[in-house]
Image: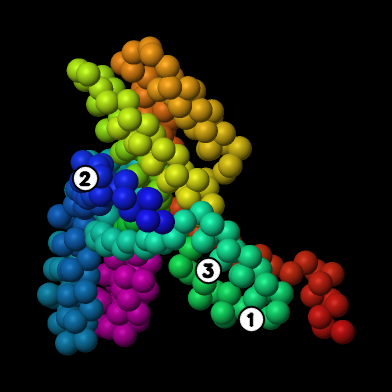
Amino acid sequence: MAEVKKRLQENKEVTKQVEAAQDNYVDERVKKITEEAVEAIELVAKVVDLLDEKQKDKALEEIANVLGKLEVLIARDPNLQLVPVDVKEQVVDFPGTVDDVEAAKTEIVALIKAGEVQLARDIMLNLASELDIFVTALPIGTYPVVLKAIIPLIEQEKYEEAKALLIEALETLVLEKIVIPLPILRAEQAIIRANELANGENPNKDELKELLAYAKEQLELAEALGYGKVEIDYKDLYEEIEKLEKILEGEESTKGIFETLKEKLSAIMAKFNQPKAPTKMPQASDNEKKEESK
């Protein structure tokens, strides 16, 4: 662990690049927030208040405003399904080494076998090193339908029924989660830095070796933490790192030697930079349910 920290301190440029990359991932999502979508949500909330006050005309007027804003969004992109309205971020960063991860896994298995599920859960929650980006999105397809269905209810002064439908619409906001694994991000940024140095004048091979070793350590940590599939995501990376280690021990030029590894890491990061599908809880089979019911 001390060695990992030492390398980070020795190359402050990589640390800066990692921090900038994290900000870029969040900013990328924030830029997709549209003013019309945010205003539409705010107006819907305002309509709920107007229905409480039984202000029929004002409520209908605001619904017309909401529909207008949604129509603008649909006109821009008829295939649009979800429109971001809010972005939040959270960083969880496991401070240990690969050995620490493996020790934690062993302890988790032992605790589960002993029936200590909650103790196992407490340890499991710490086994993450990631930037989590939470995007609240408006389902553009369902909102106009619900709003149009509410109009006759308001005209008939059925305020409670209209409000119930409106609240139900507000609850259809979708929460997406994007998980950016920090160890892979750090490995990528270390190799980007190594590539810059390797293509410059009089590159220091010892510095390049340090950056490559750090990237390898981070990939091993990412693998231990379960980010990606071993045979699919890591096999080619380790093979490329092994080639680079041999090149850096020789006398040949370093120009362009990190390009392939840099591209492979960028491709993996692109796979992670998308909403994560919800994890489905396993269910007992019909036979197991029958056994439990006996």
Q: Find disc 2 in the rendering and name its residue.
A: 12
Residue range corresponding to the magenta coloring: 144-173
Magenta span: predominant SS is helix
Q: Image point 87% across, 84% down: which residue?
A: 294
189 vs 174: above or below: above
Q: Nearer the viewer, mark 2 or mark 1?
A: 2
Hey, which quadrant is residue 44 in on the image?
Answer: bottom left
Say which label, 2 or 1, has the lower sequence index: 2
Q: Nearer the viewer, residue 74 or 175?
A: 175
Report crowding for label 2: few under 14, some 14 to 19, many 20 or more residues within 10 A (C-alpha).
few
Q: What colouring does the structure picture have? A: rainbow
State the image coordinates of residue 282 (x, y, percent, origin top left). Answer: 66, 65
Quadrant of the rendered structure where residue 41 is?
bottom left
Residue to which mark 3 is pinned: 124
In contact (CB < 8 Å): disc 2 and disc 1: no
Return the residue nearer the eye: 94 or 266.
94
Residue 263 belongs to the span the image colors magenta:
no
- At x 17% / y 68%, what residue is drawn? 43
Q: Is residue 255 visible?
A: yes
Relative image position of residue 29 (x, y in whole percent) = 26, 50
Asked which secondary structure carries label 2, the reply is helix
Please say if 195 is above or below 69.
Answer: above
